[in-house]
Image: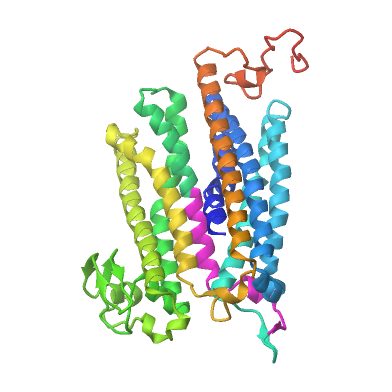
Amino acid sequence: MAFTLASHILLVPFGVALPAITLLMHYRGLRKGDAVALLLARRWSAVMAVQFAIGIVTGTVLSFEFGLLWPGMMGRWGDVFGLGFGIEAWAFFLEAILIAIYLYGWRRLKPWTHFWLGLPLPLTALMGAFGIVAANAWMNTPRGFTLDASGKPVNVHVRQAVFTPTFGPEYWHFVVGVVLTAGYVVAGVYAVGLLRGRRDRYHRLGFTVPFTVAAILTPVQFVLGDSIARSVFHKQPVKFAATEIVWKTDTHVPEYMFGRLHADGSISGGIKIPQLDSILAGFSPATKVAGLTSVPASDRPTATQATIAHWAFDIMVTIGSLLVLLALWYGWCRLRRRELPRSAWFFRCAALAGAACLLTVECGWITTEVGRQPWIVYQNMRVSEAVTGTRAASLWTMFGIVVVVYVLVLGSFLTVLVKMSRRWRLADEGVAPADTTAEDLEGSAPYGPRPLSTSAGGDRGDE
């Protein structure tokens, strides 16, 4: 489950945010009559479709795993929090239909009609995120039910089960995070091109629009991250203690950057900042922070799990802080000189920003899930009660098959993207491989007529 989630979550930023970034470029192209912007939007829509196809495979595997690997959780709690998965499924099918319409619309629909038909795409993506985050937020702060004498949930209140105390902070932190991640990843591709000397308008525009979106959202995400950390402090104090490796409940608690927690409560390594943890939690050194020993050992993460959650959280915060500096660098140059930064080091950092953001996405998931241990439903069901009783041998066989399939699928995904990029670059340079089709030679006018196929008997239906 950890492997498949860690793989699938790398695709999530593009499934949720790439439609919005593509439509923003599309709107710019139509509003300003910019053929380069329209060309970028069309090419990004092709990437969006390929990514969605890969997401179908990884998402389907996850849906099976919920039933096969977690029968205890789904059997007892499915009626309470299952609505989130239902919402995500409907959003998934709607998004598939809308992507098909959007791809079909290039050259076949009137420009503005095509744009308006694509506009619901980001909304369906956000609706899918709504469903998944609602389910995860419920697992962290379960609400909307009462337990009968046998411990089974009854009297389910759907609205309370969906809109739990952590849902708002978690949802907006997630949405902003995936949008800026997609922005940095897309911009990073063009940053590499700019570093290689491709300073044409195509690469400058392909970099500027997604990077501007990401740069604007980066400080917003930093504030939202602080908000969700404060929510965890109030609603899940033991998880907060794990992510901050706080052993004993106290005031004037120091902040540790990295470091390792041991089973006896001692901490080795890291950078100790006196009183900062209490200040960050409650804006005062006198703020009392609950420690891991505030609950029995069986109800809290182990020292190793706490260290893992702590390192994931600190990596996420460190990268976020560096991205804020990168965004400020970009904003200073844009506001002062009305142009892109000139330093090659800026574009090197921009090229790395996308990979760094994907790492923060992984770290955010690790912090959320590992910090909640040993609970799968916080304070209501342990992981040991929810997991399947399948024999270890069959689990390892299944795991091996899943790893092989995912390596092949993700390898194919990267191969297709590289091949598409090569075709587009050759088309821009006026050089076409022998197997190039008319679709690859769309030129700079996505709403114009298709070029004639160079092959004998080629399709001339769009002349």
The quadrant the C terminus occupies is top right
Q: How is the image coloured?
A: rainbow
Q: Is residue 311 visible?
A: yes
Q: Please, is residue 65 above or below residue 423 in the view?
A: below
Residue 306 within the magenta-colored segment of the rendering = no
Q: Residue placed at 42% from the left, 51% from the top?
A: 359
Depth order, front residue of 293/39 = 293
The quadrant the N terminus occupies is bottom right
Residue 160 within the magenta-colored segment of the rendering = yes
Which region shows up in magenta?
152-179
- Drawn side of residue 259 relative to residue 380, left or right: left
Residue found at the very far front of the displayed protein: 393
Residue found at the very far bottom of the displayed protein: 149
Where is residue 425 drawn, in percent x and y?
50, 21
Where is residue 129 drawn, in percent x and y?
60, 57
Specify the principal SS of the magenta part. Answer: helix
Residue found at the very far top of the displayed protein: 456
Q: Is residue 290 visible?
A: no
Where is residue 24 drawn, in percent x and y?
55, 40
Quarter-of-image position of residue 389: bottom right
Q: Residue placed at 54% from the left, 41% from the top?
A: 21
Quarter-of-image position of residue 380: bottom right
Q: Residue placed at 30% from the left, 49% from the top?
A: 325
